[in-house]
Amino acid sequence: MRVGLVGWRGMVGSVLMTRMVEESDFGHFEARFFSTSNAGAMLPTSLVGLPKVEPRLYDAHDLSALQECDVVLTCQGSDYTKEVYEPLRQAGWSGYWIDAAKTLRMRDDAVVVLDPVNQPVIDQALNKGIKNFIGGNCTVSCMLMAVGALYKAGLVEFMTATTYQAASGGGAQHMRELLSQMGTLNASVRQLLDDPASAILEIDRQVLATQQSLSAEQTQHFLVPLAGSLIPWIDADRGDGTSLEEWKGGAETNKILGRGPGFNQPAIPIDSICVRIGAMRCHSQSLMFKLNKNVPLKDIEQMIAEDNPWVRLIANTKEDSIQELTPVKVTGSLNIAVGRLRKLAMGEQYLGAFTIGDQLLWGAAEPLRRMLRILMR
Ligand code: NAP
């Protein structure tokens, strides 16, 4: 098999490359790298020595070079998928398309992949000849890796989430913008910070003045300041009071579970408020469930802990929560931390939880590389 890799130097793509090297994925197929900005250049030295890798970058818009691939795996983004996918299929290409972008996720001829949760759905799709395997929304995938056990056991009547999503969820440029803003804020009060006798309200006033006067260039990607602030809206405005990110939470979760339109099972109501915060990596989520029966907390803990090898159940204590249940702790790891589990004041069927996953790993790169390996079986 020849695999075409597109978008390998972005946020998701670079994490994917690291994981593929760690898992010795290269060598199981011939790899051809594509670029939208640097076609013809040599591969970076970090990738040149990999087995069965073509040394030069191909143009990611060159349909004939893409057609020579049995699989195209893209982390380039939805604009690229919109531009290239249909023309490639219309040109007669019948290979496998594996994608991190949202563009194709809800199509009938596409499966949202998260194999520890929906391997049977993937197997059925492969048997039916489906060729499009799309990674889910990062927040959805991390949530299902954390508490999928409750859904699999048919216990969830409804779920609400408030998310705390990292800057890197927007991509490489967004992460740089957050850090630049942090540096600008710090520089604006450096002298006052160095003086232990300076007035904290003066520091606060100057930071706010700097935040409010950041230029259009300094807020090019997030549109408003993120450093020292938050943004309670992620992705497009659907015009009905919800963001696209919030809509994905319900629609994609149900599609991954094989529920809702097109399936025989009714959708489970899932709703959320999605918030961008100034974390570097990891999407955190505060979850509230109504269960359809009263299940003892210790049984719930056991189900969650035993659901898959990556879940880490964190004891609901202050010490464990501040040490183990933070983006700083979870970043860079495939572990999915689940903590703050407790029954809520509304009644014994109401459950609260807090979960954190590295959205670049289980939320993006990992399901894609695992799908590639499933195709190689
Ligand atoms: P990204 O970091 O913006 O990378 C996308 C492309 O931008 C790269 O492949 C690269 O293409 C180009 N690029 C331009 N300037 C760059 C720079 N300074 N550094 C690196 N790349 C640069 O986007 P992403 O976050 O990886 O997202 C890719 C897709 O995955 C999107 O559809 C996104 O919605 C989805 N996704 C993202 C996440 C996440 O947490 N970020 C999670 C799940 C899904 P060339 O090399 O061709 O120039």
Image (cartoon, rainbow, N blue to C red):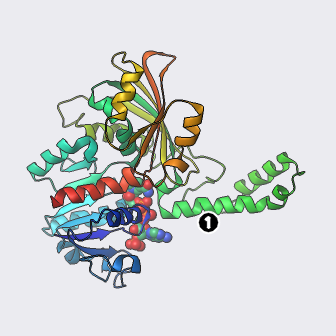
For the point 26% across and 69% down, which residue is it? Answer: 26
Q: Number of marks in the image?
A: 1
Q: Position of residue 9 (x, y in %)?
A: 41, 69
Ligand 1 found in image quarter: bottom left
Image check: 27 left or right of 142? left
Name the image quarter holding residue 61.
bottom left
Q: Is 154 placed above or below 127 here?
A: above
Q: Position of residue 65 (x, y in %)?
A: 22, 77
Q: Is 205 placed above or below 30 here?
A: above
Residue 163 in view: yes
Q: Position of residue 219 (x, y in %)?
A: 60, 60
Q: Is 83 placed above or below 307 here?
A: below
Q: Is 99 placed above or below 67 here?
A: above
Name the image quarter holding residue 180.
bottom right
Q: As drawn, which residue projects farthest toward the right?
A: 197
For the point 61% across and 66% down, which residue is it? Answer: 217
For the point 47% across and 54% down, which residue is it? Answer: 169
Residue 238 in view: no
Q: Position of residue 203 (x, y in %)?
A: 81, 51
Q: Amino acid at mark 1?
A: Glu
Q: Nearer the viewer, residue 117 or 36?
A: 117
Q: Nearer the viewer, residue 62 or 308?
A: 308
Element under disc 1: loop
Give the residue pinned by disc 1: 217
Tell me: is circle 1 under 8 Å from ligand 1: no
Image check: 90 left or right of 160? left
Dot 1, crowdedness within 10 Å: few (<14), some or many (≥20)? few
Quadrant placement of the N terminus? bottom left
Name the image quarter holding residue 176.
bottom right
